[in-house]
Amino acid sequence: MANLNVAVIGPNDYAKDLGKKGTVSDITLYDLKQGTDTVTFIEATNYPDRLAPLFYTASMADLALVVIDAINSQLGECMVMLHCADVKKGYIVLRNYLTPEQVAPLTKGTVLESYTFIEDDKNAIRERLLADTKAITSPGEPGKGAVTIDHFFNVKGVGTVILGTVAYGRIVRHDDLKVLPTKRTALVRSIQKHDDDYQDAVAGDRVGLALKNIDVEQLDRGHVLTLDDKVQCGSEITAPAELVNYWKTPLKEGMVLHLGHWMQFISARVESVQDSGDFRRPTVKLSLDKPLVHPPGSRAVLMYLEGGKLRVIGSLTLT
């Protein structure tokens, strides 16, 4: 079984004809299943009013489906988000008589430059994405996986259940996982993928986990379940940043940014900024409102919510 997570960037509810509606919050998930292969479509329900849902959508994605009705600042912000979140694979659907030549100046120099243009045919899109799942291979190493939590609730007769994505590696039923950034642990009682029971789950899988030894009141979106000792957790970060070309001013001490990683969207104050003459390549020290959980070498998205039409300003390499 393989699962492909697809960020649908475009008109709200475009994905409703691609899959069956599932979880609905500030992001909406739709499921498509054929045999043992599955596709999860993710839409940013409350975007553009709130930036966080767009970040979550891009962060969860293996691939993007960008549906363009018009060329405007909202499209530009979405493209910058996909670039900063490093969503390398994707498809572009053009509508309202738009042409690839009109879009090319926006995608140049970004990850979207390598996206493939396809027709606005939802049957063909479904078949194409199901075919893409065939190329997924990630057996994972037992005990070294990580699950990012996006929803959690109590189920009568079952107890605490979380919904999330295996960010990397593999988890197995009866694993006793750390719940970061807390000091707690939780036993995996059962694993479900698209309503079917499994003994394990690997990178890219959408999972529902029934957990023992933890209550929903002790959980939050962005918490990470893992046994990987390499995963780090801290409230202060010093790391190199890369600001996008559209961002015109240097970062300054005292600025309040937001740092996005996996399902974490955390307020961060700039404590210091150093660069070697290029303000778009600084090393920044950030003080976070709460601990950030991440493996070394991963990438985070930098956002400035007061940025007007462009609130996505760059990325950070977490050491």
Image (tube, helix red, strand yellow):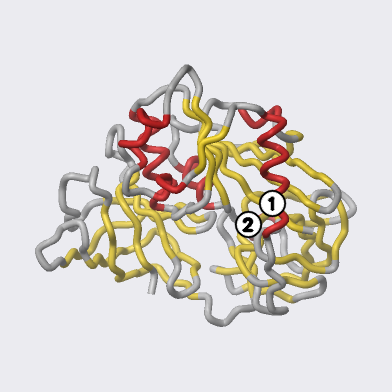
Q: Is residue 185 visible?
A: no
Q: Residue at position x 57%, y 37% from top?
A: 8
* Three-letter residue code for mark 2: Ile
| Residue 62 picture location, percent across and down | 58, 53
269 vs 81, left or right, is: left
Q: Residue at position x 69%, y 66% from top?
A: 137
Give the answer, above or below, for where 129 lies relative to 175: above
Q: Residue at position x 72%, y 72% from top?
A: 139
| The N terminus lies in quadrant | bottom right
Give the answer, above or below, for where 76 lies relative to 168: above
The answer to which quarter of the image holds residue 286 is bottom left
127 vs 309, left or right, is: right
* Three-letter residue code for mark 1: Phe
Q: Residue at position x 41%, y 59% from top?
A: 300
5 vs 233, left or right, is: right
Residue at disc 1, secondary structure? strand
Q: Which residue is mark 1?
A: 152
Q: Which residue is mark 2?
A: 149
| Residue 145 picture location, percent across and down | 65, 72
- Residue that protrudes farthest toward the bottom in the picture: 229
Q: Residues within 10 Å of mark 1 (few under 14, many from 20)?
A: many
Q: CA distance from mark 1 to mark 2?
A: 7 Å
Q: Give the label, 1 or 2, closer to the camera.
A: 2
Cβ–Cβ below 8 Å for labels 1 and 2?
yes
| The C terminus lies in quadrant | bottom left
| Residue 105 picture location, percent across and down | 31, 36
Q: Is residue 77 visible?
A: yes
Residue at disc 2, secondary structure? strand
The answer to which quarter of the image holds residue 289 is bottom left
| Residue 15 picture location, percent across and down | 65, 32
- Front residue of 58/307: it is 58
194 vs 181, left or right, is: right
